[in-house]
Amino acid sequence: MIRTDICVIGAGSGGLSVAAGAVQMGASVVLVEGDRMGGDCLNAGCVPSKALIAAAARAEAQRGTRFGVAGAGPQVDFGAVKDHVAGVIATIAPVDSQERFEGLGCTVLRGWARFVSPREVAVGDERIRARRFVIATGSRPMVPDVPGLDGVPYLTNESVFALRERPSHLVILGGGPIGMEMAQAHRRLGCAVTVVEAARALGREDAEASAVVLARLVAEGVDIRQGAAAVRVRTVGDGIELVLADGQVVTGSHLLVAVGRRVALDRLDLAAGGWSLTAAG
């Protein structure tokens, strides 16, 4: 039995901030992580997406057509771009590492936590009893219930950054912030891109502001299909095909699913801790 002031479950950006602050203010801290230190932000979210966007922005700047400077355009080495993304992750990783947090004084356990009572969690053979628990397990990509989707290869933010071959035509299911930033980045890196959004692209943003952004994306060559949900997905040859509710058919070489996020609480057995859940967590 490990007794501690605070047990932080999840070593992503939220959990690491709490753990570092608490241990430096004198609290005893146990930090639990079942996957990669740094969580989604370091490995599959903020850091790789912004590194990819930065490379894409450099490619767009070299085209120069908006400034009246026409040329052959940049030669994009897609594999080298992904090496750049991996390098940025590797540069930041030591800040989020187990070694650093153990150096700060945290006890770091690598494994999946599950509650066994309102005051205790189990991590493998270890039991942790804490005065306070901080649940910072973050979220996972939401996968919609579209017929055929489970039978085709698709990407999410957790896998797209490992793709080293440039997609000839990336189809993105979902026109929210993640879908649209990946659309612009991949278009600027030389991919044909189609975005399929069941409602309005960037629908949670101010309509006038999002209209400016969408117009720029269209001007850069992103094909945006709005107001028609995907009703069927299937593999066609070496690619994929989406059939939309209005009868449109969209085909591409790769499919990125970016329809939203869901809370990652399923491994915790929160019922044993005495909590009930809603769809929002």
Image (cartoon, rainbow, N blue to C red):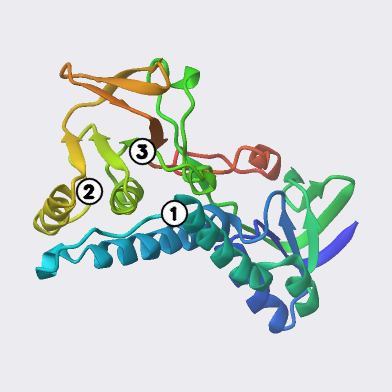
In 3D space, how far apart are the residues under numbered discs 1 and 3 (Cα atoms)? 28 Å
Q: Name the residue beneath numbered marker 2.
A: 202
Q: Name the residue beneath numbered marker 1.
A: 77
Q: Name the residue beneath numbered marker 3.
A: 259
The percent coordinates of residue 111 (x first, y second) are 77, 49
Residue at x-position 23% and y-position 58%: 72
Residue at x-position 14% and y-position 55%: 216
Q: Secondary structure at mark 2?
A: loop
Q: Nearer the viewer, residue 207 or 126?
A: 207
Q: Nearer the viewer, residue 108 or 79?
A: 79
Q: Earlier in the sequence, mark 2 or mark 3?
A: 2
Disc number lying in front (2 or 1) = 1
- The three-letter code of the residue at mark 2 reads Leu
Give the quadrant of residue 33: bottom right
Residue at x-position 77% and y-position 61%: 130
- For the N terminus, which image quadrant? bottom right
In 3D space, how far apart are the residues under numbered discs 2 and 3 (Cα atoms)? 11 Å
Q: Nearer the viewer, residue 184 or 206?
A: 184
The percent coordinates of residue 107 (x first, y second) are 81, 67
- Neighbourhood count class around disc 3 (C-alpha, 10 Å): few under 14, some 14–19, many 20 upward: many
Contact between labelled residues 3 and 1, with CB atoms less than 8 Å apart: no
Left or right: residue 117 versus residue 201 is right
